[in-house]
Image: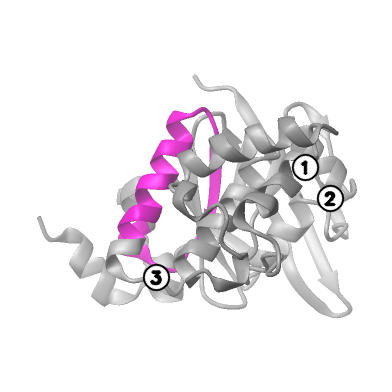
Amino acid sequence: MQEEMLSVENLTMKFGSLVANDQVSFSIRRGEIVALIGPNGAGKTTLFNCITGFYRPTSGRVIFDGKDITGLRPYKVCRLGLTRTFQIVKPLKEMTVEENIMTGAFLRTGSRSKAREIALKVMDFTHLADKGQMKAGSLTIADKKRLEIARVLATGPKLLMLDEAMAGLNQTEIREAMDLCLRLRESGITLLVVEHIMEAIMPISDRVIVLDAGKKIADDVPAKVVCDERVITAYLGEKYHAKSKKP
């Protein structure tokens, strides 16, 4: 059985009277790709923020690689090997693609030459090598999303959390993003992925966790989640459920 890498225990996050996450518990094993899905406002990004230290949860615990990281500052969480991308990409527009990726590499090294060496390897892995000297602000949305992933890859993550990395992409770009996720897993990185494009995330996920109104309502393999009546009612709808049954 695979080793447990991340454990979220009874995590609750309140904003005044609003309960964004309500007693959420789950675990992720090393080497898995786990999808986190649910309707808008379900609490997915809030959960990401609590896990990675941008919010301190009202109650509950986050255990990463055997260490309690609840409320730890984001840069310390990242240094431990748990990092995330953001739904709205924010590249350093006036810097080149290579320089953007080097900023991630400086988490692990103070050497500019070493940071550049890391950046070159990451650019090759993410198929950005031919765009290394372009200004990040001039990239297409697909390449900006790829750069977002490349920048966090340069920090040397063990577990990478992707927040809607496929949103706004065309079908070809979505297939390339799916392929990148699989290659990341093959390279030894565990993935937790928030995504709304079910046709993309379901085929590559080992498990699917579903949130609705801040509560976890399902946690299982994709084939079982798409047949769960609570998930169909809350999010997937009968149309996707019927489509998923077609050979």
Q: Would you identify the image quadrant in which residue 207 lies?
A: top left
Q: Is residue 179 magenta?
A: yes
Q: Which residue is mark 1?
A: 78
How far apart in space, not on screen, are marks 1 and 3 (Cα)?
A: 27 Å
Q: Residue at x 82, y 49 (%)?
A: 60
Task: Give the colouring mode of the picture.
Answer: one colour
Dot 3 lies on which element?
loop
- Residue span colored magenta: 174-200
Q: Is residue 224 visible?
A: no
Q: Which residue is mark 3?
A: 169
Picture quarter with the C terminus = bottom left
Q: Residue at x 28, y 63 (%)?
A: 172
Dot 1 lies on which element?
helix
> Pointer 2 and pointer 1: residues touching (CB < 8 Å)?
yes
Relative image position of residue 74 (x, y in whole percent):
84, 50
Q: Camera-side residue: 51 or 162?
A: 162
Q: Is residue 35 magenta?
A: no
Q: Would you identify the image quadrant in which residue 163 lies?
A: bottom right
Relative image position of residue 201 (x, y in whole percent):
38, 56
Q: Residues within 10 Å of mark 2 (few under 14, many from 20)?
A: many
Residue 117 as seen in the image, left or right of residue 51: left
Residue 200 as seen in the image, left or right of residue 133: left
How far apart in space, not on screen, are marks 2 and 3 (Cα)?
A: 28 Å
Q: Camera-side residue: 234 or 127?
A: 127
Residue farthest toward the top in the current orientation of the protein? 1
Residue type at mark 2 is Pro
Which circle marks residue 74 in the picture?
Answer: 2
Residue type at mark 1 is Cys
Which circle marks residue 236 in the picture?
Answer: none
Tell me if residue 99 comes above or below residue 30 in the rendering. below
Q: Is residue 60 visible?
A: yes
Residue type at mark 3 is Leu
